[in-house]
Amino acid sequence: MSRISNGVLAILILFLLPWPGQIFAEDPIRVVTTTPDLADIVRQVGGDRVSVISLTNGSEDLHNIRPRPRLLNAVFKADMLVQIGLDMEHAWLPQLLNAARNDRIRPGTPGFINCSAGIQPLDIPAATTRKDGPDLHLKGNPHYNLSPVRGRQIVANIIEGLSNKYPQYSEEFKKRGAEYLQQLDQKISDWKTRLAPFKGAGFIEYHPTWSYFAKDFDLQIVDRIEAKAGVTPHATRLAEVTEKAQQNNVGLIIVRPVNQDLARKIAANCDAKIAILPHHSSVKGNLKGYIPFMEHIVSTFEKNLKVEQR
Amino acid sequence: MKPLSLVLALLICIGAPLTSLQAQDGSSRIGLGDYGQTTVLDNRFNPAISFIGDMVATWSDDEGIEAGADGFKLRGAEIGLFGAVDNAYEFHGIIFFDDEDVELEEAYVMATDWLTPTSHIKAGRFNMDFGKLSPIHDAELPMMDKPSVLQEYIGGTLKGTGAELHWWSPLGDTSLLRGSIGIFQSADSDAHVILGPGGGHHHHEDEEEEEEGPLREAGDFAINARLSTLFDVTDSATLQLGGSLMTAPERVFGVDEDDIQDINRSVMGLDLTYVDMDESNGSGFRFQAEALMNDQDEGELDDGGTAGDPSDDIFNVTNTEASGFYVMAERVMDSNNTIGFSFNQYEHAEDSAEESSDFGVFYTKKLNEFNRLRFEVRSFKDLVLEEEGVEELVDFTAVSLQWTVQLGSHGHGLEW
C-alpha cells in the first residue's frame, strides 16, 4: 500500500472515530418552559436527560411578550412544553403554538405540562366583566410560583409530566425530583421560621400578585395600589392607599420596576419602604434558580416587614 | 285541608322535572344521561367573537375641507368570527360596517395539515400577503391611515378571492424564513381611508362596473408572492427584510371583440422592519420602511377622429412605471404611550411626472389593551383632488383624533 493510501486511511479513521459515539449517544429531551423558574425545576428533575430553554428571562411582564423568531423556533423544535397556566401566558403562547404547529407539545398531549394542575387558584373574580378591570384573570391569580408551598406542586407536576412522556427514565426523574423536593422542604421550613415573627404583618402590592406568598407565611395584603386590574390608579386612589398604609402602619410596598414611581408617591407620605421584586427567577445572575429566587424574596420581606404591626 | 293540598300539588309540579333531571345525571345509559345534545340551540361550539369600533374626528385648513377631511366620522365597526371547523380546518370571517355599507371584508377557510406542519393554505376572500401594512386591518395600524404610497398603488390593502399557500422554516435558532404564494380571481383594493389619495370614500375597484371582456384564460389570474426573513439580532431586537410581488394580468376587448389586448398591472415591494422592545416595562422603538414600484397599463379607445366610424378606431395602451416609499418610526415610551412619525413620497400611478408627499406625527395613548386614543397631525403636499373629472393638486394640514375600542377575542401573534 502506498504512503498516500495509508495517509488517506489514517485520515478516514480519524474522521470516523467520533461517529460511533455520536450515533449511540442519545439526544437530550428538548424542553421549553415559559419562565426561568420552570426551566430550573425541569433541569433539577431532568438532569442530563434534558436540554431546557426558557422563553422568557424573568424580567419581562409576562403579558407583554413579543412573539419572535427565537421563541417560535424553540417551540417548533421542542419535545416538551412546560407552562404556568391560569392564563398567565394567554397573550402570546397560544399564538406561538398555533404558528409552530408542533404536535409533540400540543395541549392535551403528554408533551404539554400545565403546572397549575392541582393548584387551588386564589383571587378568582366574582364577576366576569371588564368593568372590574381590563386585565382581569378569570381563572384566578396566576402567580402561584411565588408560593414555595405551591412550588412543591410545580415540582410534582414536572416529575409526573416527564415520567408520563418518557417512562423509561421515570425512576431517574422521580429520584432527582424527590431530592429536589427535600431541598425545597428544608428551605420552606427555614423560610417559615424566619418569617414567623412577622405573622399578620401587612404590606401593599401594586397588582394582585402576592396572595399565595402571603397565605404561605400568614402575611396580610393591606391594599392594592391598582384598584382594578389593568387600570392605572389616579391621584384619588393613591391618596386612599396612602391613608390605609398610615392607618395600618404598613412597612413594605412591593412593586415591579415599572410601577415604582407610583409607589414612591405613597411611600413619601407614610413610613414604608419600597421593594422592587421580580415575579420570576432569572436566567442568569444571583436570582438564577427557583430556590435562590425565593430566598431573595423571603429575605426582602424579612428585612422590611414591621414586627410591631402584628 | 284545601290550601295544604294546593301547596302539595304545587310542590309535586316543581319537583317532578327536578327528579327527572337527577335521574338523567345518574343514568348509566349512553344517550339518556351524560351524552347527547339536549337542545337544538346548544351554544357551546360557537366561534370566538371580536368587535372593533373606530371613530375619527378631523379638522383641517381650507383646502383640506375640499379633500373631505373635516368632521366626525365612524370609520367603521368590525365584527370578527373565528373558529375551528374540525381538527384540521379553521374559519375566519370579518364583517365591516360603516355609516353606509355592510361588507364581508374577509371570509376564508384555513387548512392546517395538508402539507408540512409549518405550512397552511387559506382559501376564500382575504387580504393578500403583500408587504407589512397592506394585510393588516385599519384599527391595528400604528398611524391613523394606511400610508399614502399604499393607497396610491394598491388602494391601501390588496384583497382577492382565491387561495394562498403560507410556509415558514427555522434558520438556526434565532432566524427564520417565510414565504407565501397565492392565486386570485383578481387583485382588488380595499381601504377605509380618512385622509390621503384614497380618502373620502371606500376604494373598491371590485365594485366598479365590470366591462365585458374576453373569456378568462389560465394565465389571467392575479398572482401574489412574498418572501421574508426575520432575525433576532439581540435578545430584544428583531430585524425583518421582505420582498413582495403582485401581478394582475387582464385581457380586454380593444377596438372590437376580435381585438384582444393585454392590460397588465404589477406592484413590487421591498420592506425593512426593526423592532427593539424592553419587555420588562414595555418600552422600545420600531422603524419600518416600504418601497413600492408600480407598473400599470391603461387602455383607451381613440375613435381616430371619426366619431361613429369604428373602422379607424385605435386602442392605445400606455404604460406607466411609478415608485414611492414610506418610512415610519415609533418610540414606545411604555406600554401605554407611543409617539411616532411617518413620511410618504410617491410618483402618481397614472402620471409618474407628478409627485406627492405627506408627513405626519402621531401620539397613541392606550388607556388599556382594549381602549386606545390617537392624536395625529399630517401635512399633505400636492395631494390629488378630483372634482367632476378635473384634477387639482392641493396642500393642506389636518389634525385628527381617533378612538378605537375592542371587545372580545384577540391575540398577539408573530409580525410576519
Image (cartoon, rainbow, N blue to C red):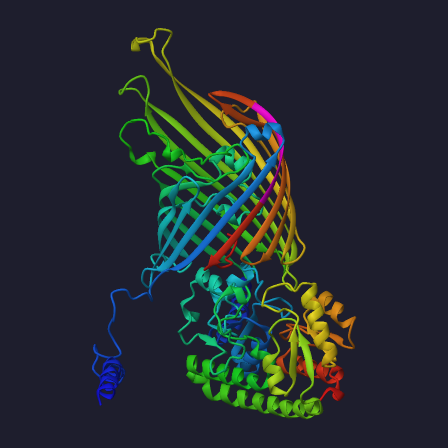
Specify start and end residues of the magenta stretch as a single range. Answer: B393-401
Q: Is residue B262 above or below residue B175?
A: above
- Direction from residue B120 to residue A242 in the image, left or right: right
From where the camera sits, is residue A2 visible? no
| Residue depicted at 29% across the width and 33% down the height | B217
Specify the principal SS of the magenta part.
Answer: strand
Residue A126: where, in percent of width, then height? 49, 74
Does residue B400 show up magenta in the picture? yes
Residue A7 lies left or right of residue A168; in this view the side is: right
Residue A231 visible, this angle: yes
A249 is higher (above) or lower (below) than B108: below
Q: Position of residue B83 (x, y in %)?
A: 37, 59
The count of marks equals 0
Q: Is residue B262 magenta?
A: no
> What x and y, as percent, mark residue A28?
51, 75
Instruction: Between residue B22 and residue B394, name the one nearer to us.
Output: B22
Give the camera-side residue of B270 and A170.
B270
Above or below, A230 against B267 in this view is below
Say which quarter of the image contains residue A291.
Answer: bottom right
Q: Nearer the viewer, residue B188 or A246?
A: A246
Above or below: residue A50 compared with residue A226: below
Residue drawn 31% across and 9% down?
A: B308
Quadrant where the N terminus of chain B sits is bottom left
Q: Nearer the viewer, residue B37 or B59?
A: B59
Residue A196 is situated, as x and y percent measured from the top left of the image, at 68, 92
